[in-house]
Amino acid sequence: MEIRPVGVNANTRWGLEPPRLVVCRSGYALQSPFPTAVAQLGWMNTIQGWRPVPTEIPTTTPAHVMSMMHKILKASPLSAEDQKRLDDLYAVIEREAKVFIGYPCSTVFDYSPLYPFLGYPLNNVGDPFVPGNFHLNTHKFELEVLGIFQKLTAAPEDSIWGYITSGGTEGNLYGIFLGRELLPDGLVYYSEDTHYSVSKILRCLRVRNVMIKSDSDGRIDLEDLRETIRIHRDVPPIIFANIGTTMKGAVDDLDGIRQILDDLAIPRHYIHADAALSGMILPFVDDPPPWNFASGIDSISISGHKMIGSPIPCGVCLAKKEHVDRIARNIEYIVTLDTTILGSRNAITPLFLWYAFRTVGLDGFKRRIEHCFDTADYAVEQLNKIGCHAWRHRNSVTVVFDRPTPETVSKWQLAVQHKLAHVMVMPHVTRERIDRFIEDVAQTTPASSGVLPS
Ligand SMILES: Cc1ncc(COP(=O)(O)O)c(C=O)c1O
């Protein structure tokens, strides 16, 4: 019998002699000079005797040994029943990911080299620009990511502040909060196509607000906006502009909005841009509409788990520094400034975003987005061939079409609104996946006709 003992470094954090994984053709076992300590770590059932392995072990390369080790460690702390529940959940998620085309989250990422950081209670509490007293943080990497977004959003260098958020919603909360703090008597204007979370934010902040009509293509109706602002001319407007609406991917006309403010001679105003998805698309297209700091916005929110992709929701929020300076508070407990919405903040997601930019790169994201546009055009073409009235905005990966049957909506996890549904053509969506989807839609009758953009 061939036996090959292999040292494994799994336990150095506890300062113990590393247990050894012994692998042979008929089984494997862990051996350690400190069985009690190993037992405390939950490995007792693996340290004595042989456990059968389902298949012969063809090789004992270090990578294979580590993977066996991982299986042992993974299996040991849970009861068989609990482990089965996890395995079942994983199987469901694996299966559902194959038909995931309705929501704007890329599944194309691999952050496994960063997993060792999950072994520590990292926390980016406080302002990323001000060193604090909680040293288990990733602020340096957070700042690098902010620097990249500063360029992508055409924000003036050195006069911009920001932080990595828990997602687009928190960035929007921050933007409206900042606008409200600067203009306490302000009135928020937002279109009826705005993301559902914004009306809740407005309730939380107890800020006065008016919903403005949208055009049929999803953009804010400038005539309704002009008329409503005119009626409330004595109150400073806080404009919540959509840079890519949730359902139709429409971009509000920022130049048109600023023209209205000029025409009505309203110098005191605040503009927040919700660029949840399109904030990582428009920097990479040749002919973007006005959408960023160069077009007069005061703050912006972009999701990180959408076009970039992340297993943990995240986002980035940027705002003009002069605004943030007016609301910052010094906090002795953490020896830094309390500028962010949350106290404890995720320190892993800044690493994910940093890693994505370092590995995929800006050119890589440009190519991914071109792939998305190409596949989105294909989806529009194929859906129209079967009579589903599909369309998309220029520079958008959102393909809008007639709402299909409830079975199709559920199977393909489609977001729907009234008579419409959409497919989000993210980097993981291929022509083959679109073909399988079209097959399903073709077998059913579209419920009704959708609205084509004017
Ligand atoms: C336009 C828009 N704003 C805000 C959000 C909320 O972003 P998050 O899910 O990152 O909180 C979404 C989410 O889809 C969105 O589409």
Image (tube, rainbow, N blue to C red):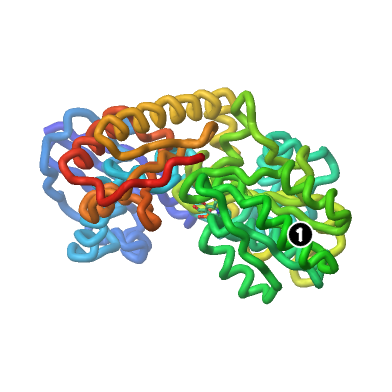
**What's the residue at 61%, 74% (across, down)?**
203
Q: Nearer the viewer, residue 122 or 275?
A: 275
**Percent position of residue 394, x then y:** 53, 32
Q: Is residue 8 above or below residue 11?
A: above
The residue carrying mark 1 has its beta carbon less than 8 Å from ligand 1: no
Tag 1, which secondary structure?
loop
Q: Is residue 370 above or below residue 227?
A: above
Q: Which residue is mark 1?
A: 132
**What's the residue at 57%, 23% (across, down)?**
363
Q: Is residue 302 left or right of residue 129?
A: left
Task: Tell how many labels.
Answer: 1
Q: Nearer the viewer, residue 348 or 252?
A: 252
Q: Is residue 30 visible?
A: no
**What's the residue at 27%, 46% (across, down)?**
94
The picture quadrant where one finds residue 366 is top right
Q: Nearer the viewer, residue 360 or 428?
A: 428
**Percent position of residue 55, x then y:** 11, 38
Specify the quadrant that holds the N terminus.
Answer: top left
Q: Is residue 213 left or right of residue 370?
A: right
Q: Is residue 269 visible?
A: yes
Residue type, label 1: Gly
